[in-house]
Amino acid sequence: MDLFSSLVMGLQVAVTPVNLLYCLLGVTLGTAIGVLPGVGPIITISLLLPLTFGLTPEASIIMLAGIFYGAAYGGSTTSILVNLPGEAASAVTCIDGHQMARQGRAGAALAVAALGSFFAGTVGTLVIALAGPPLAGIAMRFGAAEYAALVFVALLTTAAMTRGGVVKGVGVVLLGMVFGTAGSDVSTGMFRFTFGIPELRDGVEFAVLAVGLFAVAEIIGNIGEPQGEAVSSRNIGRLWPTRDDFKRAWPAVLRGTGLGTVLGVLPGAGLSMSSFSAYMVEKSTAKEPERFGSGAVEGVAAPESANNAASQTAFIPTLLLGIPGSPTMALMLGAFMIHGVQPGPRMMGDHPQLFWGLIVSMWIGNLLLVVLNLPLIGLWVRLLRVPYHWLYVFVLAFACVGVFTLSSSHFDIYSLVFFGALGYLLKAAGCNPALFVLGFILGPMFEENFRRAMTLSRGDPMVFLERPISLTLLLVGVAVLLATTTSFVRRGRAEAED
């Protein structure tokens, strides 16, 4: 099947009334969540995951994907208007976007962010469609040794590039792998890490773990925190940018899109690094770098474009290799697996309607973001006035009801509390709980392929070094690990996180 026929099939799936409705619901929820500080796409996806079990795989994944890139877009609104980023990836937009708002040019900044995000999302979606078939063909040549090396590199690079340091990152990943391998051993049938608890013989329920680790842990962490002052909206001003704004913004959009497209594919790079890198590129190449920080439109166009492009291309390793490059993609991979779909090189052949329907829905979702969000700017700003303690009460009640409906088991509620406490302790220790999810998802995958490779090689570990692809992947992982120990990378990562 050629690319055009595949896209036509995907369009037929994406524009069905049910899938179109869930796409609209996803991008709307994602935008609403994106404007709320501290409640990002990870928490939202984990919270809504139990509610998608009754949906078709297409509707479920389309809605969850809409939440992800909707949240990547939504943080720009409050970053520009009230200097309050909804997500870490939107923090860079505050630097020049809020200065434009103070000058009465908030409308122009919001329009540039919306148009740049739409263009970047379109390019990112096109890259997935074009790169899908050849990458899947290459991945079909992977054996057990190559997949084990690929999973190892993904875990190592993500742990190394995440805040908290390499040691803490690797430690959290290993802890997640222990929980991921709990239950019955596939090869021997023996129970492991069950501690005599019958409910753990089938393993830990992913939805319970995700909701507890993010939603409940966030609530525990915010108990007793002082509430921020009420947010007031600012005069939007003229919504359409001037000709000079377009002249300055489009080159920045192109560069930001290209940079975000590349960094979105890399494990551990994430949206924050894409936004920060795009901003630094614009500032370092500008003829008048002193304009940055005082309302330069390029300082809005570049990071927003990079942010949205990266949120699209982050799906490439997840869909085509079955290897999530970020914690949010690990949740998406878990959603696929819950619906009985195994992402990887065979996905386009085994589930073509789901794959191409998701690709086309990404473009439709980006179009809906532009059409909906500019008229709804005032609504999103008013949403910030909702007291946070009300919001968290609803989140906790929603989490408990959603988890209990999975199997009507009290043990799931106890597990929810346990993982909520664990997530809070990890954050208090300066660790990233999202790495726990990566270890939980990828741990069993690494174990299966590692054992298979060792069986085929009759116990010879040199099989990983004798095969060119696995050797290259291992060298890449070691190189990334060594690079993160340099002062230059540590300084750049610290600046991106701040």
Image: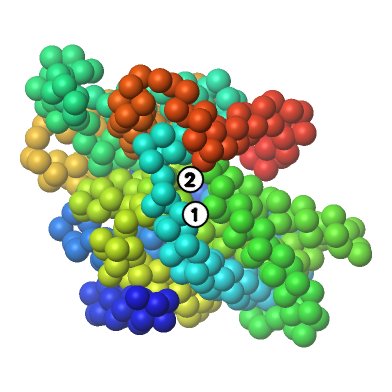
**In-image side of 460 versus 258 (left or right):** left
Q: Outermost residue, top direction?
A: 195
Q: Position of residue 466 (x, y in %)?
A: 51, 30
Q: Is residue 31 above or below residue 265?
A: below
Is residue 155 visible in the rendered image? The answer is: no
**In-image side of 171 versus 176 (left or right):** right
Identity of the residue drawn at 71% across and 51% down: 277
The Cα–Cα distance between marks 1 and 2, rounded to whole angstroms, is 7 Å
SS type, badge 2: loop
Please state, as top left, top right, bottom left or bottom right, where the C terminus lies in the image: top right
Identity of the residue drawn at 41% across and 34% down: 145
Figure disc tally: 2
Q: Position of residue 441 (x, y in %)?
A: 34, 37
Residues marked 1 and 2 touching at CB (< 8 Å): yes
The crowding category of the residue bearing disc 2, from other C-alpha atoms within 10 Å (few below 14, some 14 to 19, many at least 20), is many
Residue 146, by quadrant, is top left
Q: Is residue 336 above or below residue 451?
A: below
Residue that carries the numbered disc 2 in the rendered image: 325
Residue that carries the numbered disc 1 in the rendered image: 314
SS type, badge 1: loop
Residue 200, by quadrant, is top left
Amino acid type of the residue that numbered disc 1 sits on in the rendered structure: Ala
Amino acid type of the residue that numbered disc 2 sits on in the rendered structure: Gly
Pick the residue in front: 252 or 152. 152
The crowding category of the residue bearing disc 1, from other C-alpha atoms within 10 Å (few below 14, some 14 to 19, many at least 20), is many
Q: Is residue 128 above or below residue 272?
A: below
Is residue 135 visible in the rendered image? The answer is: yes
Pick the residue in front: 154 or 62. 154
